Amino acid sequence: MLPRVFVIYRPTPDGQAAARFAASVARPYGELRVLLPVAPLPVADLPGLAKEVVGWTGEAPSTYGWAHAPVESFFHAGDPETFDFGDAVVVDGALRRRDVTVLRPQFERGLFSRGDGPAMLPFGDRESGLRAAAVGLPMLARMGFTEVVFYHTTWRDASVESVRPEDHMSANARSQLAGLRSSAEGRGLAVRERVETADEISSGVRAAATALGCRLVVMARGLTRRGTGLVDMVANDFAVPVLAIGRPKGAS
Amino acid sequence: MTRAFLRTAYGVMAVTVLQYVLKVALKGGFGAMTHSPVFTGDAWHQTSDIFQALLVMFGIWLSRRPPSRDYPLGWRGLDAVGTLFIGLSLGWVALTGVIVPSLAGLVATVPWAQVRLGGWFAASEGGGSHLLSGGYGPAAVGIMLASAAVSYGIGRWQIRVGEDTGHASVAADGHETLSDGKVELLTAVGIGLQALFGAPWIEYLLGFGMAGIMLRTTFEILENARDMILNRSLGEDAERRIESVCVGMAGIDRVASLVTYRRGPYAVVDVTLVTRLGSRGREDVRQVLSKMIPERLEGLPGSVTVRFVAPDPRKHREAFLARRDGDVLAVVGSAEDANVLVVCEVEGGAVVSCYDHPVASDTLRETIVRKHVDVLRVARVADRARLQSALGDVVCVREEPTSVAALLDIPLD
C-alpha cells in the first residue's frame, strides 16, 4: 500500500507547483494531505484554504480523495521541521529532513507531464540501494511507471582487461543488481541497466537520468553521512524530480 | 586502392576520373574510325567532365583545410560553390548537348522546317548513318550501353559517398554522371531505332524527354547550392522536431527562440530556452541537447548552440492590509481595522522582502499610490467589491483565504 502523500502549504510559486505535483502523485492512492505550518489549526479558514489548494492542483478534488470525507480531515497543523509525517511521502522542494521521505518536484508540473519515461534507481554496493528499492519499487509500480533503470558507477579494475564497465563491477554490486532486477520484474516493471565508470557519482546519475528522459530518480539517504549527502548532490539544482527515501527511525 | 580509400570522396572521384579517361579513349578512337560525330562529340564532352572532376577534387582538398583564426568555420563553404558550378554545367550540357542537337536533328528531318529554320542550326548529320553504313551499328550500341551502365554505377556510388562524407559537390557530380548515363542510353536507343526503323526523329524526341530529366536534376542541384549559399532555414519539420526535443526535457519552461540555417554542408541550430535551473542544471541539459538535436537532423552534420534565459521576474509591489498588535500580525479585510500596510517586493511571483508602513482608512488610497502598489491583499473582507470601488482602479484587490500571517507569503523575520 502506498504511504500517504503530504504537501506543505506554501503560497509561493514553488509551493503551488508542489501542490500540483503532489496531486498527481496522490491520485493512484487517492488521498492528499496538507500540512499548515502554524499552530493551532485555523479551523474557520480551512474551507478557504482547501479551495485555494484545489485551485493550485488544477484537478478535481475527488481525484485525490477529498470527496469522501470533510476537507478539514485532510489538513494538519505543525512545524514542517518537527512534524511526525510517519511513513508519508512529502512533496516539497524546500524540506531537507533526513528522517522523512521527500519528493522534490523540481520544476515539473507532474510525474508524466512531459510524457512517459522510466524511473531511475541508482545503487552501489551499500545498503542504501537495497533500501531505496524496498521502499521505492512498490511506489513506482503504483505511480504508473512501467520501466526502471538501475544505474551504477564502478571503479576501473586494473586487473580486468575488458573495456565494458559491467565487467569491472564488484561481486557485491553484481549480486545487488541481480536482486534488484528480480524484485522489479516481480512487480511488473521492465528493467534496464546502465553501468558506467563515471568520474563522479552524482554527475553520472544526473547525466544519465537527463539523457534517458527519466521522470523520477529514487535514492535512499545514507545512514551515517553528515553534511551534504549524495542525495542532495544529485537533487540540488537538478531538473528531474527526486524521491529521497528517509532514514529509518532511530537511525539518525 | 584499398576498400577504405574507395569509400572516401577522393577515392570515388579518382575512379570517376579514370572511367572518363577510358571512355574518352574508347569513344574518341571509335568515333575517329567510324567518322561518327556522335562519338567524337561525346568524347569531347567527357574530356570536359575530366576537368570538372579534377576541379571537384581540388575543391575537396581546399574544403579540408582546418579552421583558422581568419576562417573559424574552415573552408567547407566552398562545397556550395562547387555544387553551384556543377549545376550550371549540367544545365549547359542539357541545353547545348541535348536540346540544341535534338532540335537541329528534328529540323533536318522536316523539309519545310529545314527550309525556314535550317540556317539557325548546323545540319545534323545523324550519327546512325555513318555508323550503319560500315556495319558498326551493333558495336556502337554496345559501347554506348556499356558506357551507360558504367555511368549509372559510378554516379550512384558518387552520390552515396558524397552524402556519407558530407561533400555536396561530390553528390552533385554524381547526379551529373547519372545524367551522362541517361544521354548515353538515349544515344544507344537512337542508333538502334535508326537501324531498325530508319526513323531518326524518334531519337530527337527522346532527346527532349531526356533533356527534361536533366533540367530537373539541374534545378535540384541549383536549389541545394542556393540553400547552402543563402543559409536557408532547415525548414518547419526540422524545427518542429527540435522544439519537441527541447520542451520534452525536464526543467525547460519553453523555447524562447530557435534559429536554424544551412551553412555550406552544415546545419546550424541556435536555440534559447527559458529555465529556472541554475548553472549546474543548465549544463546537464546542454550536454544532452547537444547530442539529441543533431540526431533529429537526418544525417546532416551540424553544430548546436544552446543558450538559457531565466523567466521574466515580473518585479512589482504587492501589499497586505494588516493590523499589528505588538508581535502579532494579522491580515484584515477593511481599512478601518488596519493600522499597517505590509509593502512587499515581489519577484517571480514570490515575496522577496517587505516592510511595514503605518496606514489609516483615510490615508490608504494615497499610500497605495505613493508606494506604487499593484495588488492589495486582504483577508475576511466583508465586501470586496465595495473596497475595490473605494480604491478605484489604482490597485487590484485580492482576497486571501486566511488572516494568519504565517500562512501567507509574508516574511516574518
Image (spheres, coloured by chain):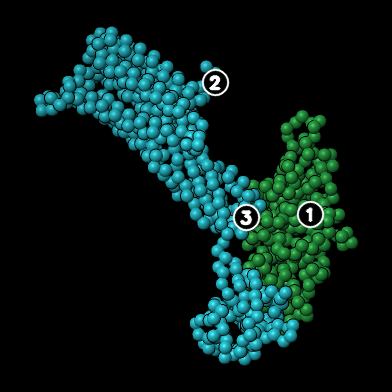
Chain colours: A green, B cyan
Q: Is residue A48 left or right of residue B185?
A: right
Residue B337 x, y percent position in the rendering = 65, 90
Callout 2 secondary element: helix
The chain holding disc 2 is B
The residue that mark 3 highlights is B250
Q: Is residue B191 left or right of residue A229?
A: left
Residue B169 x, y percent position in the rendering = 42, 30
Q: CA distance from mark 3 to mark 1?
A: 23 Å
The residue that mark 1 highlights is A229
Residue B294 location, quadrant: top right
Relative to B407, residue B3 above or below: above
The residue that mark 2 highlights is B3
- Amino acid identity at mark 1: Gly
Q: Is residue A138 visible?
A: no
Residue B308 x, y percent position in the rendering = 57, 54
Residue under the image location 57 percent in, 65 percent down: B313
Relative to A11, residue B227 above or below: above
Relative to B43, residue A12 above or below: below
The chain holding disc 3 is B
- Amino acid identity at mark 3: Ala
Callout in the foreground (3, 1):
1
Q: Is residue B395 left or right of residue A25?
A: left
Residue B348 location, quadrant: bottom right
Q: CA distance from mark 2 to mark 3?
A: 45 Å
- Amino acid identity at mark 2: Arg
The chain holding disc 1 is A
Same chain, marks 2 and 3? yes
Q: Earlier in the sequence, mark 2 or mark 3?
A: 2
Callout 3 secondary element: loop
Callout 1 secondary element: loop
